[in-house]
Amino acid sequence: METKGKILVTGGAGYIGSHAVVELFQAGYEPVIIDNFVNSQESALAGIASILNIEVPCHRIDCTDVAALREVFRKEGNIDGVIHFAAFKAVGESVREPLKYYHNNVGSLVALLQVMAEFGVANLVFSSSCTVYGVPDQLPVTEETPVKKANSPYGNTKQICEDILTDLANSGGSKIHTIALRYFNPIGAHSSAKIGELPLGVPNNLVPFITQTAIGIREKLTVFGTDYDTPDGSNIRDYIHVVDLAKAHVVAIDRLLAGKAQQIEMFNIGTGQGNSVLEVVKTFEKVSAQKLNYEIGPRRAGDVPKIYADVTKATQELGFKTELGLEEGLASAWQWELYLQKNKK
């Protein structure tokens, strides 16, 4: 079968990675997964296979291992581009274990760039984050919003990785072209309910905590602070449906392979709209017809009061816009939670 190109997806069994693999395949690409399954589960591969009716190749290696990466590039041959998701992403854990985060998140990018250069692979989509903006002075944040001191080692690893990519682009000696996508808050699951967010242990993100509380895995949800300077006092975030986010990666790969990208480009990937934690809770109750057991707790250290994206650049230059809203995201997350419950071993 003729494809538009072979795309290596690091962290391809993870939450966003698995959805990107599905969208890449459906857009005519040949995805190949790299994952070490430290932060993901094998069941994601079965979910992808069930949706696509094909098993996507998967190499079980660690992306900080240069020799193992070389072996994958050698075996696969003719890799047209790489999407680099593989990273640790828990803010709280990064504060407790900074070296783990610097070694993995920064080390894996450096190793990947070295091997890409060796094998002449020139197209990279990098998974960045709105955490690079820290606590912004003005909203919404644009790509020109100053990058401020990160609130956590996790956020700092994303800033450092963007700096590495910028330095490489400015070095004059690199052929690698990079599009860094600064995600806002991914939520939801595939419409098939066969892949979705699968946190190991206690969830760090709001929506899986909501769905686990609704189904009875968690006793209650704590809303951390209702005394912020927001309409209802709770934090405001820009919640983007994971399927929309996955499609942004396909658009970015299209742009790179068509030779339309500058050597390095940054794009905000969000909806352009903020929703508060309490709004998310109430919307979930509406779409799921579940009453949620929640309480108000104190603020959580490191939380940014409010942040949402200006998506003008992504719309105009990348040609990307979201299609799905908060209700669809929460409804699909609930269907995924019900699917997990039904298919418990």
Image: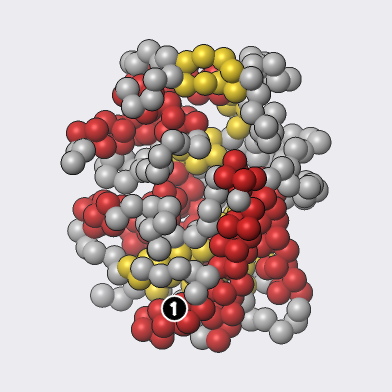
Q: Residue 83 location, x and y as percent?
A: 49, 64
Specify the quadrant of the image occupied by residue 104.
bottom right
| Residue at image mark 1 | 68
The C terminus appears in which quarter of the rendering? Answer: top left
Along the line of sight, the residue nearer the viewer: 92 or 281: 92
Q: Residue 20 location, x and y as percent?
A: 41, 55
Q: Residues within 10 Å of mark 1 (few under 14, many from 20)?
A: some
Q: Residue 308 location, x and y as percent?
A: 65, 36
Specify the quadrant of the image occupied by residue 311.
top right
Task: Identify whether 195 is placed above or below 340.
Answer: below
Query: What residue is rendered at 31% in x and 24% in y?
Result: 215
Specify the quadrant of the image occupied by residue 23.
bottom left
Question: What kind of colouring is applied to the model shown?
Answer: secondary structure
Residue 240 seen by the camera: no
Query: What residue is rendered at 44% in x and 78% in y?
Result: 68
Left or right of residue 253, residue 101 in this image = right
**Number of numbered discs:** 1
Residue 334 seen by the camera: yes
The N terminus appears in which quarter of the rendering? Answer: bottom left
Task: Identify whether 286 is placed above or below 147.
Answer: above
Query: What residue is rendered at 57% in x and 45% in y?
Result: 93
Along the line of sight, the residue nearer the viewer: 141 or 68: 68
Left or right of residue 26, residue 98 in this image = right
Task: Identify whether 189 is placed above or below 255.
Answer: above
Assign a secondary structure to mark 1. Answer: helix
Task: Identify whether 150 is placed above or below 318.
Answer: above
Q: Residue 222 location, x and y as percent?
A: 52, 21
Query: What residue is rendered at 67% in x and 81% in y?
Result: 174
Q: Amino acid at mark 1?
A: Ala
Along the line of sight, the residue nearer the viewer: 26 or 55: 55
